Image (tube, rainbow, N blue to C red):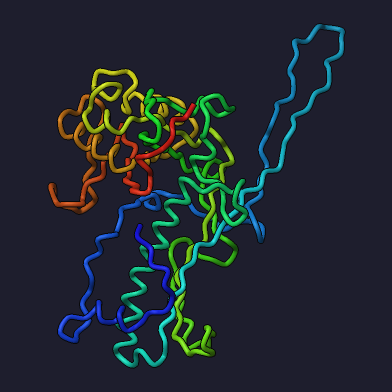
Amino acid sequence: MAVNGNGYVNFVDQATTKVKGQFVKPAELLAQRNDWMKYARWQESNLDTCEEFVIRTSLPDAYFVTVGKGVPISKSTSAKIQEGWAIIEQSTEIPRHLVRGEALAETLMNERMASFESVAQKAAQAVVYANGSLNDDQFNGWAVRMATLTGGNAKQMFSCGGAMANAQTSIYAVKYMERGAYFITPPGMTAGLSSEDMGLCRATDASGVLDVYRQVVNMGLGFALQDWRCLGRICNIDVAQLNALSGNQAPTSFLNIIHGMLYLISRMGRLGSGPIVFHAGQASFSALVRLATEKSVNGLGYIEASGAQFGTPGSQQLTFHGNPIVLMDQILETEAVVS
């Protein structure tokens, strides 16, 4: 994502949005597809600063009974877990003397569209890669929870065997459930992007005071994982092999992404009703589209959107054994090897 951090909207910015004196909607060359919200489950956090819940950590011991003898007493144990949330925000300020009337509305709308895209991309990036352990203003995303093949949740990970440094990608699987995995919002905030027109405000710079029109776009979110089995990762997917459908990603290999998805379905499908949502980056998504088009024996296919005519662009959902696959451009193709 290209970022401009030069502050106020100025005359040069105004000029670049006009053709023959008229505002023109720009071609959004920096727009992305990050469809993680399509199937996500949301709820408001139950505390002011976090979501708090209880998990069971052990079951009481059970014993065979010997007639005439007592049975030992036992009990279960539980623990409290807290999951944090974050707010992602972008502010735009337009000097009062720069625009008036219709020009103001056009400028605000133009900047609002760019702000929506910027915040949406930052949110998608955070969902995957945020690290609340290192950054107090963030929450823990998917990658940091599934960062090693030897951890306690290693059974929820499938390695495709890629070994080239910084040339890997991943597919992340989430089973959204009430007591499993879901996104949280700060108290009082709605799920998704929001925009607020702050009106005319007074700002200061090195020269003195300045009246500016200000608008804010933000999004509050966090990820709560009550049941660690509701999150899975197919990692160490070599991008070069994936693009060529060769090596470990050849259709005949038992280390390809199809086998990784089957592995996660076998582990996550038993947790309850509802689909497992697979989130794939561009390289993985493209490979799955190719495989789905070439053959159906892998369980890959398309589901036509309700009411759509067959073949209508964008009307079909890529699925694997009935579980949706969504595109997330923010999933990197330069991930490190997970070991």
Q: In the displayed structure, does residue 39 sit left or right of residue 153?
A: left
Q: Residue at x 39, y 57 (%)?
A: 121
Q: Quadrant of residue 3?
A: bottom left
- Residue 107 lies, with reference to residue 219, above or below; the image says below
Viewer-side residue, 226 vs 28: 28
Residue at figure coordinates x 67%, y 43% from the top left: 81
Q: Quadrant of the N terminus?
A: bottom left
Q: Is residue 288 left or right of residue 202?
A: left
Residue 87, image quadrant: bottom right
Q: Residue 277 location in percent, x, y? A: 39, 40
Q: Position of residue 206 (x, y in %)?
A: 53, 84
* Residue found 52% across the figure and 57% down from its top: 221
**In the image as oriented, which residue stretches furthest toward the top?**
67
- Percent position (x, y) of residue 236? 39, 29
Q: Position of residue 209 (x, y in %)?
A: 53, 90
Q: Residue at the spot x=43%, y=51% of the render?
A: 125
Above or below, 119 against 58 in this view is below
Q: Is residue 125 left or right of residue 136?
A: left
Choose between 133 and 304: the one closer to the eye. Answer: 133
